[in-house]
Image (cartoon, coloured by chain):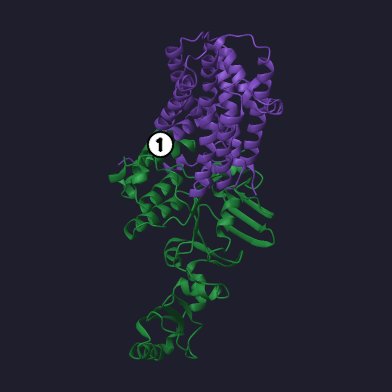
Chain colours: A purple, B green
Amino acid sequence: MATSDVAGLILPFGTVQGGVRRSLRDYGSMVRWHLAGLRMWLVLLGSVQALSGVGFVLGISLFFSRIPTSAALFVSTGVPVINLVMVGLVFGPQLVASQRTAGSYDYLRTLPISRAVTAAAWYTVCLISGIPAVIVSLVVAQLRYDLPLHISLMIVPAVLLTCLTGTMLGYALGHAVGNPMVTQLISQMLVFIIFGFAPILYPIQQMPGWLADLNWWFPFRHMAVVMRAALTSSADPAVPTAYAVIGVWAVVAAALAGWSLGRRP
Amino acid sequence: MSTAPDEWTFHVDHLVKHFGTVAANDGITLQVEPGEVYGLLGPNGAGKSTLVKQTIGLLKPTSGRITLGRWDLVENPDAARQLCSYLPQAQMPIDSFRLREAIELAGRIRGAEIGRVRRRTDELIEALELGEWSRTLGARLSGGVKRLVGFCMATISPGHLVILDEPTNDVDPLRRRLLWNEIRALGAHGCSVLLVTHNVLEAEKAVDRLALIASGRLVAEGTPSSLKEADRAQLRLQVMLVPGAETPAQPGWAGPPVRVGNNLVTTIAESDAPSGITWAAGLIDSGVAEEYALGASTLEDAYIRLTSDIPVDGLHGDE
């Protein structure tokens, strides 16, 4: 057996490593860590995501004897938002809660990886699990309704930012709330709010005025605006504001998550 | 700026950590030299894990300093995570990982080069006799094997300070011996090893020096031999009582008794050995005890003597 050079594996004397190269390598290692850690779940998660997306897309037709194209288009262009935020926003915090309960959370916090790299790796995993579901949902919608989809290049920032904000919100929730039970409760509430009280799958005009006004301050309505505009190449004047609101939420959530991860009681 | 190998001394200086009004660490000062295996012993709630968590950046001290070489670990938690490696008391999150994959990935995350990581993984798997599970998923491993995998993950690319919190929990006796060999090898390679345990008998054989911590304070420090010095010329008399039996009255020539479950332990002077045997045999004859043993005093006796004002239940158990 080859004898390893243990001394060579101890960090070079006097150096604490950093820099872009180290960060890129750490990022790759952490993505592999997450993908391996979720290997028993990732396919299932992706499948459930795709199935729920397809369920919304096909299920809406059951409300109508003959579904208007506008209704089919509205639901089909809202479903990708749900596909993109659910893993980061709901599954993410529940994963952190289970790590806290199992006691492995402390180990993960002591890994020599920067908080930004750790967050970026988790964001990548959320993208990997969400994008296939988006594609499946849109393909099924197109086949079923023959929709007037005109996907513009703005789909790239819309997908990236929507997923980022959902992931960072979940990341902040998972790490800032110390009690795993409270984390689980809040993430369940978020599902309830997104499906029932955020104008993602139905027009905001259907809501009472006060609830529509309240929704302006939260990111979900705006995610639907940018996604819909990118999928239909429409020139919605609300898009710039929507990007700004989603971006602010992403920054605030990332800052909160970073603060929570670095906090030492 | 570089730090010479012999300058990687680990210092804890007047460390205080309060949780509300409770002092979990109350002015602890200690020092671990490179290459030294240093035991932290103490009963449940003594403050051992609190000290470790402040070292690795999970908790912030109320006051005091923790340094490793020239690095202030309290001021630089990022540096602490690179310079120290840590095996927590809880199991590692490896249910979805294959055994070998978990160890190699931990090495990569610690920043080590892949060729070296693979060679060292081979070495650890062989040294701890884990080869038969090399491709087994963590979810299918026993608790003891998982513990060993955790040890490998923590030491695949060891920091200058390796912190092991109860490393032998759940591990079978044969592999415990192999594990202790690997812990000693870390010291031989120049790592300082901070070993948290309350398994006094195992620690006695494995550590170079140790600290006894009780109620957040360091109550004794030294080599196992030096801590046993006061018990020299003393014998340990251990009596296994019949379950449910009342603790018998202690003869005047015996030291303060400690009862854990049905196990009654006391110390006696060598000259009182015949009296001790007669007394213990009498307990068996009267149906109070089932058996007894008389032997040389151990570190456990020193531990009991030094921490006698605190509860001792769970002395051998897991924290």
As drawn, B221 above or below B270: above
Q: How many marks?
A: 1
The residue drawn where x is 57% and y is 72% is B310
The residue under the point 43% across, 75% down is B261
Circle 1 is placed at which residue position? B116
Extreme left residue here?
B132
The residue under the point 36% across, 58% down is B176
Q: Is residue B302 above or below residue A43?
A: below
Q: Residue B306 occupies which quadrant of the picture?
A: bottom right
Q: Residues within 10 Å of mark 1 (few under 14, many from 20)?
A: many
- Near-viewer residue (B246 or B76): B246
Does residue A103 appear in this view?
no
**Which of the image's four quarters has the N terminus of chain B?**
top right
The image quadrant that residue A182 belongs to is top right
- Residue at coordinates 46% horizontally, 82% vertically from top-left? B267
Residue B312 in picture, x, y percent from top left: 51, 72
Label 1, secondary structure: give it.
helix
The amino acid pointed to by label 1 is: Arg
Q: Please state the horizontal and vertical placement of residue B45, each as a whole percent of the image.
A: 56, 63
Q: Quadrant of residue B280?
A: bottom left
Foreground: B48 or A98? A98
**Furthest residue toward front:** A65
Please indicate whether residue A57 sits to the left or right of residue B59 in the image: left
Q: Is residue B304 visible?
A: yes
Q: Vertical placement of B199 versus A172: above or below?
A: below
- B317 vs A193, left or right, is left
Residue under mark 1: which chain is it in? B
Residue B94, horizontal then vertical, whole percent: 41, 43
Give the percent coordinates (x, y) of residue A15.
Answer: 57, 38
